[in-house]
Image (spheres, rainbow, N blue to C red):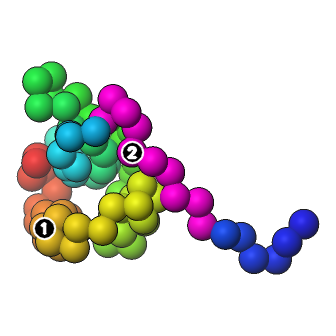
Amino acid sequence: MGIFKRKLTLPVPKECEGMEIKIQSSTCTGEKTIGFSDRRTGELRYPELVRSQADIEAFYEKYGLTDRHSIDQLISQLRQTKTHKV
């Protein structure tokens, strides 16, 4: 048992390669989720709850993505109103 855990970077799932990363907001509760967005169906795949900017950065780190411009855009969307749907 170790004290320090090594961060594990997962590959982007094969069915999600080429998809956009988007944040969606629930109309009822305002809860925000981030995931890979399928352009044809609008479905959000591998969604994760977003409470802060750190959650967005953790999502990108989890899959080894480094596009800083995209991260900054999603963070600015997170700061917008609760009913905004991306």
Residue type pointed to by label 1: Gln
Do the CB atoms of the residues marked 2 and 1 lie less than 8 Å apart?
A: no
Q: Which residue is mark 1?
A: 73
- For residue 56, the mark is none
Image check: 18 left or right of 13? left
The residue nearer to you, when weighing 67 against 75, is 67
Foreground pick, 79 / 23: 23
x%, y% of residue 83? 12, 51
**Prevalent SS, magenta region:** loop
Residue 66 or 35: which is nearer the viewer? 66
- Residue 52 shows in the view: no
Residue at 31 percent of width and 45 percent of height: 35
Using residue 59 as the reference point, say whether residue 23 is left or right of it: left
Report, in whole angstroms, how far the alpha carbon at label 2 lies from the one at label 1: 20 Å
Q: Image check: 85 left or right of 4?
A: left
Tag nearer the camera, 2 or 1: 2
Residue 27 at x, y percent in the picture: 17, 41
Question: What residue is shown at x 33% (from left), y 61% (from top)?
Answer: 65
Q: Which residue is mark 2?
A: 12
Disc 2 marks a residue whose amino acid type is Val
Residue 18 within the magenta-colored segment of the rendering:
no
The residue lying furthest to the right in this view is: 1
Element assignment for label 1: helix
Report the residue at 15% width, 22% height from top. 41
* Segment colored magenta: 7-16
